Image (cartoon, rainbow, N blue to C red):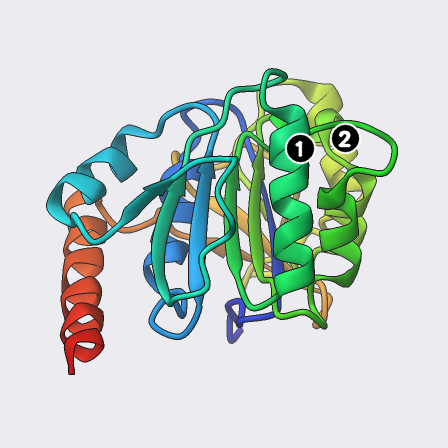
Amino acid sequence: MTVRGPNDTHRVLVTGRTGSGKSQFSIAMLSQANFHQMPWIFIDYKGEPLFEEIMEANPSIKRIKVTDNPPKKPGLYYLNPKPVVDDEAIDAFLWKIYHQGYCGLLIDEGYCLPQARKNCFDVLCVQGRTKHIPMIYLYQRSNWMSRFAVAQSDFRAFFEQDDTRDQIIAKSFIRPCVLPDGSTIDTLSPLPDYYCLWYDVGKGKTALLRPAPAREAIIETFNRRLMRHNKRALV
């Protein structure tokens, strides 16, 4: 089975318990994103140690504030908002991205986003494709997710969950994976460490993906691609 990955208009939902591998998997996806063509912003509510390492090695990754205007230049940007305290500011920031377009988002701890009835995140889920706002958003719990985050996602990655309620909810939006021997694995099945079920909504097919590359390999990919991007920007 050929496994597709996201392009520059897709929305990717990633869910799994703490320590299941979802953050490393998502940052590995970001390492392959088109940040040489448009800005990509990592909205990181928790403070991800792996990305801190990546930023230490790459000073070209710019830290921005929720009160800033969204970047327009291609490259990688890092935003570390505070839950609840920054709700109004982060929603205003996302509305600016909505009007600007052509900006990618990786959002860790998606449940920390503003939960108001007409929040911008839900609008981005619905309309982001036409505005070229690709998104990767992470949730620890399946029952914490915005319904728009599920319904509008083009790909859904399910990592190990230890709560049966979350497993059952995820089963409603991720089809079972059919293995070569005809057996199946679904969200109620035990998964090997750091593996995930990868559901391609467009194809209606689910694959079992191996763990993301090692941290060192991910960092090296960022280093190589950012160095190439920075050299081009100087020309």
Q: Which residue is drawn at 77% across and 45% down?
A: 122
Looking at the image, is 160 positioned above or below residue 184? above
**Category of crowding for the residue at label 2, using alpha-carbon neighbours closer than 10 angstroms: few (below 14), some (14–19), many (at least 20):** some
Residue 183 x, y percent position in the rendering: 62, 53
Judging depth in this view, the residue of 75 and 159 nearest the camera is 75
Q: Type of residue at label 2? A: Ile
Judging depth in this view, the residue of 203 and 126 nearest the camera is 126
Judging depth in this view, the residue of 200 and 111 nearest the camera is 111
Looking at the image, is 24 positioned above or below residue 166? below
Mark 2 and mark 1: Cα distance apart in space? 7 Å
| Location of mark 2 (residue) | 168
Q: Type of residue at label 1? A: Leu
**Category of crowding for the residue at label 1, using alpha-carbon neighbours closer than 10 angstroms: few (below 14), some (14–19), many (at least 20):** some
Q: Which residue lies furthest to the right in this view?
A: 117
Q: In this view, does 84 lie to the left or right of 1?
A: right
Q: Toward which corner of the image does residue 222 lie, by quadrant?
A: bottom left
Query: In this view of the protein, can residue 141 be seen by the observer?
Result: no
Q: Earlier in the sequence, mark 2 or mark 1?
A: 2
Residue 42 x, y percent position in the rendering: 43, 44
| Location of mark 1 (residue) | 188
Q: Which residue is drawn at 75% across and 40% down?
A: 171
Q: Is residue 117 left or right of residue 7?
A: right
Q: Residue at x 79, y 57 (%)?
A: 126
Q: Residue furthest front?
A: 68
Callout 2 secondary element:
helix
Residue 82 x, y percent position in the rendering: 51, 20
Q: Toward which corner of the image does residue 172 lie, by quadrant?
A: top right
